């Protein structure tokens, strides 16, 4: 299953242009996402004192001496230690499910995957730190294109028991951005002025995480339009007026669904032609975290990508498509390995394991 999400798309047999979806992306980014970022840049938001990001920064006890590449490397070396202490998933640590609701609301459990990207450009960090995101949302149960604040207060009254969000955190990038922010703020603030960490997180990091949330929300919306009842549509929750782009998003996605079910497409062609907000297409948004696919990490990575598999299998069912038999066999093998190794049962809360089991049966096994 890993190869399905981490290899480049085949040469596309199609290059579908959806003007309605292009309009939604252009207008949503310009009038709502960017306006939210500008608003928070001037008005710090609310954040719990023990938020997971604040705790990470409090535990990175490495002084910054101005050498960004060296600092990134030093923080990278302690990622495994921090992950073990905080219950994050890495290739070496199984991690655990969190019930603290640091990003989503009550009823949504959260799984954190920690990474340290070796290929990230130090020049990018130095010049573009305000626009980079160390947080990438890999999965969540929200549908729609509502602009929401990922500070743990999202209201999801329709969320099913056992609902999960999986979130990737690049700890060295987060630490570097924090140090560069402190430098920028100190140069403007009067000497001796306190610099609350929460301001950095609510003005920069949480707003920048919104795009990856919206990317997954597009996929969830498409799956919901094909009949899945596993997602909750959430409206915008901003302190300013926001236009409702959902009708146009729904119309565009329905047109794509019709196209993908009338004709036969390979999975990667489908994923390459679903436009999203933070990337060019969904295939980029669903790339797996850059960690080894070990027994410690496999459970979280599978949970993160089960919704993608479920949506693709639904396309096959609706279009009676047999073009993806090779990928379907890979999915069967992955599920067999998970059953044999009990990856999705052992060491995770029983109610999460039960919910995942029900989801797999209803949305995947029954369609294979």
Image (cartoon, grey):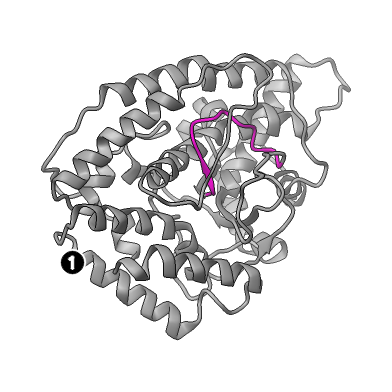
- Percent coordinates x, y for residue 66 in the rendering: 63, 34
From the viewer's perspective, is 9 left or right of 205? left
- Percent coordinates x, y for residue 330 in the rendering: 27, 70
Q: Is residue 165 above or below residue 103?
A: below
The answer to whether residue 9 is visible is: yes
Nearer-the-camera pick, 308 or 314: 314
Q: Residues in magenta?
A: 140-152
Residue drawn at the location 48% of the way across and 76% of the way down = 295
Please, which residue is most extreme toward the right here?
192
Residue drawn at the location 58% of the way across and 30% of the way down = 235
Quarter holding the N terminus is: bottom left
Using the rendered view, name the quadrant where residue 97 is placed: bottom right
Helix, strand or loop status at disc 1: helix
Residue tagged 1: 325
The magenta stretch spans residue 133: no
Residue drawn at the location 51% of the way across and 39% of the way down = 213
Residue drawn at the location 61% of the way across and 31% of the way down = 148
From the viewer's perspective, is 321 left or right of 101? left
Quarter holding the C terminus is: bottom left
């Amino acid at each position: 299953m890993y190869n399905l999400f981490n290899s480049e798309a085949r040469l596309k047999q199609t290059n579908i242009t959806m003007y309605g979806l292009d309009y939604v992306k252009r207008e949503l980014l310009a009038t709502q996402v960017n306006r939210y970022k500008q608003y928070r840049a001037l008005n710090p938001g609310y954040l719990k004192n023990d938020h997971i990001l604040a705790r990470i920064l409090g535990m990175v006890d490495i002084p910054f001496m101005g050498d960004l590449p060296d600092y990134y490397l030093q923080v990278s070396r302690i990622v495994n230690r921090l992950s073990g202490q905080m219950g994050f998933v890495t290739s070496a640590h199984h991690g655990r499910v969190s019930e603290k609701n640091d990003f989503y609301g009550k009823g949504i459990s959260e799984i954190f995957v920690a990474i340290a990207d070796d290929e990230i450009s130090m020049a990018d960090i130095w010049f573009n730190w305000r626009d980079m995101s160390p947080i990438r949302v890999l999965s969540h149960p929200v549908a729609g294109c509502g602009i929401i604040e990922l500070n743990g207060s999202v209201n999801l009254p329709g969320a099913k028991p056992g609902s999960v969000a999986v979130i990737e955190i690049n700890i060295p990038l987060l630490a570097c951005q924090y140090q560069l922010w402190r430098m920028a703020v100190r140069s403007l603030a009067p000497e001796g002025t306190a610099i609350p960490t929460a301001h950095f997180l609510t003005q920069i990091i949480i707003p920048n995480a919104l795009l990856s949330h919206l990317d997954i929300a597009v996929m969830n919306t498409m799956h919901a339009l094909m009949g899945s009842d596993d997602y909750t549509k959430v409206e915008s929750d901003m302190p300013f007026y926001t236009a409702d782009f959902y009708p146009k998003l729904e119309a565009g996605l329905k047109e794509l669904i019709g196209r993908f079910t009338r004709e036969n497409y390979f999975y990667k062609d489908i994923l390459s032609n679903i436009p999203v907000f933070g990337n060019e297409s969904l295939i980029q948004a669903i790339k797996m975290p850059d960690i080894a696919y070990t027994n410690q990490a496999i459970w979280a990575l599978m949970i993160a990508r089960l919704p993608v598999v479920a949506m693709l299998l639904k396309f096959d069912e609706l279009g009676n498509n047999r073009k993806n038999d090779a990928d379907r066999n890979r999915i069967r093998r992955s599920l067999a390995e998970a059953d044999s190794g009990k990856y999705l049962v052992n060491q995770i809360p029983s109610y999460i394991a039960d919910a995942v089991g029900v989801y797999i049966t209803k949305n995947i096994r029954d369609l294979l």
